[in-house]
Amino acid sequence: MTQENQQLTLALSKGRIFEETLPLLEAAGIKVTEDPETSRKLILQTNDANVRVIIVRASDVPTYVQYGAADFGVAGKDVLLEHGGEGLYQPIDLNIANCRMSVAVKDGFDYESAVQQGARLRVVTKYVQTAREHFAAKGVHVDLIKLYGSMELGPLVGLADAIVDLVSTGSTLRANHLVEVERIMDISSRLVVNKAALKLKRERLQPILEAFEKASKRSS
Ligand SMILES: Nc1ncnc2c1ncn2[C@@H]1O[C@H](COP(=O)(O)OP(=O)(O)OP(=O)(O)O)[C@@H](O)[C@H]1O
Ligand SMILES: O=P(O)(O)OC[C@H]1O[C@H](OP(=O)(O)OP(=O)(O)O)[C@H](O)[C@@H]1O
């Protein structure tokens, strides 16, 4: 095997996923030697010459792994559901970046009666696939409008009746006078592995996957 074939590339997003993956990497003996918050570099080296980290948008992690540009990565269940998971093996729930996906409305909006009356609701979200499935399963009629961020603004400026977004502490909802009216699902981040890499680089990947699994169980 050539040196290049031995190299493993891990796709991570900046922020909470990077921060919360660091202890798992350390459990596998891997230390990232550069900080993505202070460096503009998109390829970060580690103490292991055969492992490098690439920094991509959270929602792009599954795409890099699907096409083999990264051998493995860490992505939220929210992102994986929107992507569809094609070409990805998802062996471990890492139990990091925990939150929930919920429906929220402006304080005072009677969501239950609107639903009971069969009203057609306008919903803004970044998670169109998951939202569509959720409302279809409930038999609620919705017009979904895709946004890329600041969903909480939608009901405040008359763009929508409701939002589907991630909630953790609830402080973003409170700050914008919104209330959570339905929990759709719990969200955590998963390790995703390129299916071909799992076969071809199993020897290098396996110990890392095992260390991640052990460390993520310890923290649960
Ligand atoms: N408030 C939160 N608390 C805990 N976990 C969260 C929270 N918000 C998002 N997450 C989880 O962390 C992941 C990464 O979120 P992050 O905010 O870093 O990226 P993003 O801004 O949503 O993505 P993108 O850059 O692609 O638009 C999300 O996909 C989700 O699974
Ligand atoms: O319930 P809370 O603890 O307030 O967390 C919820 C917020 O967290 C996420 O945004 P994030 O902080 O990731 O900002 P961004 O997606 O706009 O980068 C999510 O989109 C909510 O706005």
Image (cartoon, rainbow, N blue to C red):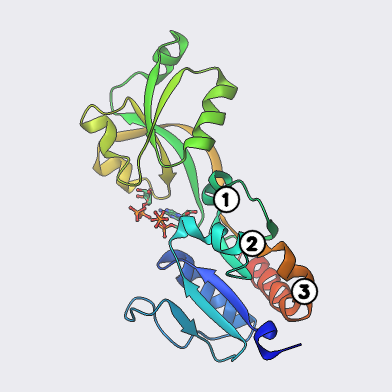
* Spot occupied by residue 92 in the image (x, y as percentages of width and height): 68, 61
* Spot occupied by residue 100 in the image (x, y as percentages of width and height): 49, 45
* Spot occupied by residue 130 in the image (x, y as percentages of width and height): 53, 37
Q: Secondary structure at mark 3?
A: helix
Say which amino acid is labelled 3.
Leu
In the rendered image, the quadrant that contains the N terminus is bottom right
Say which amino acid is labelled 1.
Leu
Compare residues 116 and 201 and report the one nearer the observer.
201
Task: Tell me which residue sits at (70%, 72%) in the image.
Answer: 209
**Sequence-wise first label, 2 or 1:** 1
Estimate the spatial distance between the alpha carbons at disc 3 and disc 1, rounded to whole Å.
23 Å
Mark 1 highlights which residue?
80
Compare residues 8 and 213 and report the one nearer the observer.
8
Compare residues 97 and 49 and report the one nearer the observer.
49
Mark 3 highlights which residue?
200
Disc 2 to disc 3: CB gap under 8 Å:
no
- Crowdedness near tag 3: few (<14), some (14–19) or many (≥20) residues, C-alpha within 10 Å: few
Taking 31 as reference, is 16 above or below it? above
Disc 2 to disc 1: CB gap under 8 Å:
yes
- Crowdedness near tag 2: few (<14), some (14–19) or many (≥20) residues, C-alpha within 10 Å: many
Say which amino acid is labelled 2.
Val
Q: Secondary structure at mark 1?
A: helix
